[in-house]
Image: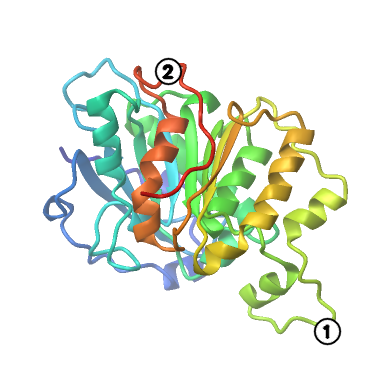
Amino acid sequence: MRTPRPALACLAAVTAAALAAAPSDELPDPKEADVVGSLSYWKNVPSKHLAQRRHVSIWLPPGYEKDESRRYPVLYAHDGQNLFDPRLSFTKVDWGVDEAIAAGIKDGTIDPPIVVGIWNTPDRRREYCPWDLGPEYAKFIIEELMPEVNRHFRTRVGSGSTGTMGSSMGGLISFWLCWKHPDRFGLGACVSTHFPFSAVNLAKAQGKDPAPGTPETPLILSDIAGGARFNADPRPRLWFDYGTVNLDASYEPVQKQVDAWLERSGMKPGTDFVSRKYEGADHNEAAWRSRVGDALKFLFPGRMAAGKKEGPSRKLR
């Protein structure tokens, strides 16, 4: 099934910088990707809020074209080129999101969403950073991309049917979107979330040398120490996870402090949020592929998953 291309003119005016940074139109044929369901691309999508253009992958679940009365939840996923096709993925291993959802459809554990994979750009670290270009990236999704998706596809509109997912910095911006825009994003999968991100990291992301004495305290912990509260209304459901190898080995201490803060803010563990540790898991697409199904089952539970409670952390198998 061919997905209609959006009317890009109605998205926004494009800056000269965006035109200069437009990604290549040359993409592998999605029909050759051995994807379950239907995959297509919106190419070089512009924004009035961001300098860079980007591609967007649109994945429709199996059976989408058969029942024109059915509407679907939507998942906005970051680093979109890594989700479905290993030829495009950063490490040549994709997340297998289509396979995970298809397996969940088969066993009744996942209510299948439409997946909107937003490709990253050279400004990735800044766009996924809540203390830099993250607010502008949010405007791009909410004001420009989301209306086009809702216009072209049979979506369920509302925060309870709209999720966001990402890993590392993508996990960080997913968390922030649910925190600051709970009326739009009621479901968040924050995978290997880079909560240790500090002012030193921010300076480097902006191409600057950190000034002497720049604190290395994670910015989220500085916000919490400054009195920030997780007062999102309506209350979202959040999935957090992390591994124990390489970069992920540094995540547990900060994640636990964020978990405690969420509890103090009234979020209930196991119901409102899950924080799961995967022993032996690395910080890469292969690790995220192995457990993305767990996150999707939490965000979009199917009929067989209804009423089940999340268990304690477990080892990755």
Q: Residues within 10 Å of mark 1 (few under 14, many from 20)?
A: few
Residue 211, image x and y in percent? 80, 82
Residue at image position (35%, 43%) is 7
Q: Can I make out residue 5 in this image?
A: no
- Depth check: 273 or 122 in front? 273
Q: Are marks 1 and 2 in contact (CB under 8 Å)?
A: no
Q: CA distance from mark 1 to mark 2?
A: 53 Å
**As displayed, is residue 54 above or below residue 7?**
below
- The colour scheme of the drawn protein is rainbow
Residue 105 seen in the figure = yes
- Please provide percent x and percent y for residue 275: 58, 42
Give the number of the disc on residue 212: 1
Picture disc at residue 306:
2
- Say which quarter of the image contains residue 252: bottom right
Q: Which residue ends up furthest to the left in the rendered image?
A: 32
Amino acid under label 2? Ala
Q: Residue at x 39, y 67 (%)?
A: 22
- Please name whichever residue, 141 or 48, is drawn nearer the observer in this view of the structure: 141
Q: What's the residue type where badge 1 is placed?
A: Pro
